[in-house]
Structures are given as structure tokens and as C-alpha cells.
Amino acid sequence: MALRKCGNLFAARLAANSARSASTMTVRDALNQAMDEEIKRDDRVFLLGEEVAQYDGAYKISKGLWKKHGDKRIIDTPITEMGFAGIAVGAAFAGLRPICEFMTFNFSMQAIDQIINSAAKTYYMSAGRVPVPIVFRGPNGAAAGVAAQHSQDYSAWYAHCPGLKVLSPYSAEDAKGLLKAAIRDDNPVVFLENEILYGQSFPVSDEVLSDEFVVPIGKAKIERQGDHVTIVSYSRGVEFALEAAKQLESIGVSSEVVNLRSLRPFDFETIRQSVHKTHHLVSVETGWPFAGIGAEIAAQVMESDVFDQLDAPLLRVTGVDVPMPYAHTLEQAALPTAEHVVKAVKKSLNIA
């Protein structure tokens, strides 16, 4: 009887562990968990922004945090991005570690002076005496049906600026691990989320569920191994790249998909190693083509030994070079898809 009980207990624990290992998490919950854990871990961390407290956040990213941590840690602000971003930067100057949420990064333009001239430059201008440990986070890029003033992708804008670290997660693992790393970093971090990805679920391991799980800043992740072509992307573009890789597999093309995760610092070494294997390169982004992330990848390829490894020119898949239309059909036409990625890969490999 005792042996049977022990066997049943072992089986129950094994089943519980297997279920936990096979669990899934949405990007929304991953971001919420990251902030919750870091607020508990460090009493200098707090969240401020429009509707983040009593309303639980415009996209429910901060759901439950105000009730759990109170008014001093979760702070509702007036609708004044320049004002509350300035308060957050000043708090970082004073040794706190604020998380400043923008309802959309389109509205961060109202606070651009605080982000660039105050947050990004102060450590350098103070000769290293004044660190600015702050995270600016919120949805970036196109959502659905919100037109030009709510759909812009600011990846290349912020990645252009020395003094900032710029992160752009794809999965729940990325979202949790990168946000925790950003909060712990002593530099200003621009954390570019994607509204469409908030509700998507991803498998997560026991390691991801741990309170101490952190993804290192500046390190890309190979989402899929392949031999014939390297597809590099970030944020929602990784979704298109992975879908394209599945379609290409059906015609015998093996695609390696690289999720950049971090746009500044930029992990060019992972791209270099991949292209040395595949000899073909396609970049994917949802933003505009001119001076975009793909253009920077192309420049670094040209200026390095990677150029000698290419058997075809690097090809870029991007959004269309227009402000985002409001009409649904035009909005669809303005954004890249997996089919665009497949077409670019076929062109690179000279497949009809």
C-alpha cells in the first residue's frame, strides 16, 4: 500500500511538472509578470503612465498591479507625455528605476526631448557620474485600423541614437526576459512592444516562469535552424518569417530564422555566422524601407567579411513607404506578409 501511494505521488508530481513545462503564456501576461516580479524585487522600481493604475492599463498589461502594489508604485498620470516622461527621467537621475509607459510610441514624439536630450545623453554629458536607469515601454508599429498617427514603427528612429538601448520582443519568453533585463539595466532602454502580439500565446519552460529568468540584452536568438537562407527579423516580423519558413519547407527550402530581439546593441555576429552557413540573406521589418533596420543590416554586411559569403544580394522585406492608410484594404497592402518573405527568398535562391 505504501509503495502504491509513493508511486501515485511520483506520478502526480511528474504529471504536474510535465504540464508546467508544456504551459503557455501570452505576451501580455509575460510583460505583466516581469513588472510584478521586478517591483517586488526592487523597491526603487515603479510604473507610471496614462491609465496604468486604476484602469489596469489601456491594453491591460498592468492588470492587477495597482491593487497589489498601491499608489506609490503604480501611478496614473495626466495626458501629458512630455510631463510624465520628464518626471520619470528626473526620478531616474535621483536613483529610482522608473518604467514609463506610452499608450503608443507614436505619442512618445511628444516626449522626444526628454527621451533623447535628457535620458540618452546625460550619462555621457556627466562623464559617467549620472546613470539613467529608465525603461520607456509600450506598443510600437502598426496595430489594426488606427491609421497613420497611431501606426508608425519607431525601431529605426530610436536605434539610431547612441545612449539608448533598444529592445523589440517577439515571444512571451522575449517579453518577460528582456523587460526584466531592461529594468535591471543602468541605461535608458526603449522597449518596443507590438499590440497585435499582446494576446498571442507562446510555449514557455520552467526557466521562463522563474523569478530570475532574464534574457541578455544584445543577443539574438535563432528561432529555426536552416541551411539555405537566413531570414532576419524582430517583433511581429518574426511571425512572418517563421510562417514563410514553413511554406518554403514544402518546396525543399531550409530557412534559418534569426530573431534579433535587441536592435541596439545589435548582434551582428549571429547574422554573420548564419550567413557563413546559408550564403543568402533576407531581412524582414514592418517599418518603412528608407534608413530602416534592414538597411543597417545591409550596410554592415557590405562593410564586413559577410559580403564575400553571399551568393546573391541581400533582399529587404518592409512596409510600404507611405503613411499608414485607414482603409482596411489599403492597410493590408501597406504591410509585409509571409507571402512577401517567400517571394524574396525565392528571388534570392533563383527559384521560379
Image (cartoon, rainbow, N blue to C red):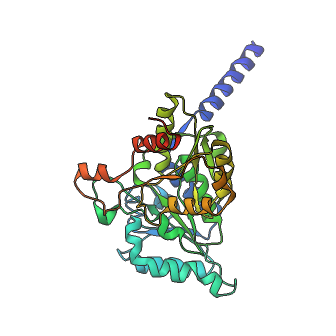
Task: Spot the residue most to the left.
Answer: 327
Instruction: Tell me where residue 61 appears, x and y as whole percent.
Output: 45, 55
Location of residue 105 by image quarter: bottom left
Residue at the image position 47 percent from the left and 59 percent from the top: 67
Give 44 or 275, whichever is nearer the viewer. 275
Residue at the image position 51 percent from the left and 62 percent from the top: 295
Left or right placement of residue 201 versus residue 305 in this view: left
Location of residue 225 by image quarter: top right
Task: Spot the residue most to the top.
Answer: 1
Instruction: Tell me where residue 13 appears, x and y as whole percent.
Output: 68, 27
Give 346 or 41, whichever is nearer the viewer. 346
166 lies above or below 59 = below
Residue at the image position 62 percent from the left and 34 percent from the top: 21
Task: Spot the residue most to the bottom.
Answer: 126
Q: How many marks?
A: 0
Instruction: Tell me where residue 103 appears, x and y as whole percent.
Output: 39, 64
Location of residue 76 by image quarter: bottom left
**Residue 165 visible:** yes
181 lies above or below 256 = below
Give 241 or 151, whichever is nearer the viewer. 241
> If the image is split into quadrants, where does the N terminus sit?
top right
**Residue 215 visible:** no
86 lies above or below 60 = below
> If the image is split into quadrants, where does the C terminus sit?
top left
Give 299 or 220, whichever is nearer the viewer. 299
